[in-house]
Amino acid sequence: MTTDPPRARRVLLLAGSFADARPAIGLAVALAARTQAALEAVLALDPRTEAAEGARLVTWGRPAGTTLLLSREGMSIAYAADARAFRSSLDRAALEMKLRASFRTDSGTLPDLALGLRQPGDAVIMACRRFLPLQGPVAALEDDEDGPAARLATELARMFGTRARVLPADTPPDVLDPMLLSALVLSRTNSSDPAHLAALIDAARCPALLTPVA
């Protein structure tokens, strides 16, 4: 018998830049509204970038794929501007849905922060995007076609007006790369290792969700 997907107590949206966060904000707000969950957003600064003498930053206000080579000072300025843009966009979207949303910055990679900050009942969204908007399927990596990840993928697909697709939990990252997904939902079996999470995010290049756990 098909049951509802698990209800989130908190929707935690993580992004490494506003360019990544922008397409996922609507998803996070809609999911929080639907599940009556608290909404928290975190702009993550990768410590490897922070430690570098210069960094290539993909900028949201320029043509797709444009990068800038920044000094540490320039990176700090760009990071502050990203934080302002992220928070402003989040606040507007949350206000439209009559939600309260909180925002902060943190240091760490998306997988490390996702696993470190996740609490029981949290739905975690790791924001990532391709350079072109997509209307592809929402995929779940789960062996049970009626499992929590598959059910959440079905719900998200309804929200997007697209279709859901369930793939085996051990699907390798390179299989995801050409699929042009709207979102990727991960089960417990493939969302515990930071290195594997990073590989899946890099391949899928779309918002990746960790399903709530008790």
Image (cartoon, rainbow, N blue to C red):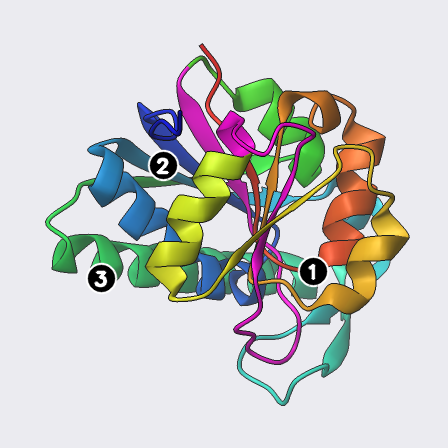
Residue 59 image point, x, y percent: 62, 75
Which span is picked out in magenta?
121-149
Q: What is the quadrant of residue 78 in the picture? A: bottom right
Q: Secondary structure at mark 1?
A: loop
Foreground mark, 3 or 1, reads 1
The answer to whether the residues at label 3 and label 2 have Cβ atoms under 8 Å apart is: no
Report the residue marked by disc 1.
205
Could you tell me how far apart the alpha carbons at marks 3 and 2 are, in whole angstroms? Answer: 14 Å
Report the residue marked by disc 3.
92
Could you tell me how far apart the alpha carbons at marks 1 and 2 are, in whole angstroms? Answer: 22 Å
Residue 137 in magenta stretch: yes
**55 and 201: which is toward the camera:** 201
Q: Earlier in the sequence, mark 3 or mark 2?
A: 2
Q: Residue at x 57, y 69 (%)?
A: 136
Residue 22 image point, x, y percent: 46, 65
Report the residue marked by disc 2.
40
Q: Amino acid at mark 2?
A: Glu
Could you tell me how far apart the alpha carbons at marks 3 and 1 are, in whole angstroms? Answer: 25 Å
The answer to whether the residues at label 3 and label 1 have Cβ atoms under 8 Å apart is: no
Quadrant in the picture for the N terminus: top left
Left or right of 111? Residue 195 is right
Q: Say few, some or many: other residues with alpha carbon within 10 Å of mark 2 (under 14 / 14 to 19 / 20 or more).
A: many
Q: Secondary structure at mark 2?
A: strand
**108 and 158: which is toward the camera:** 158
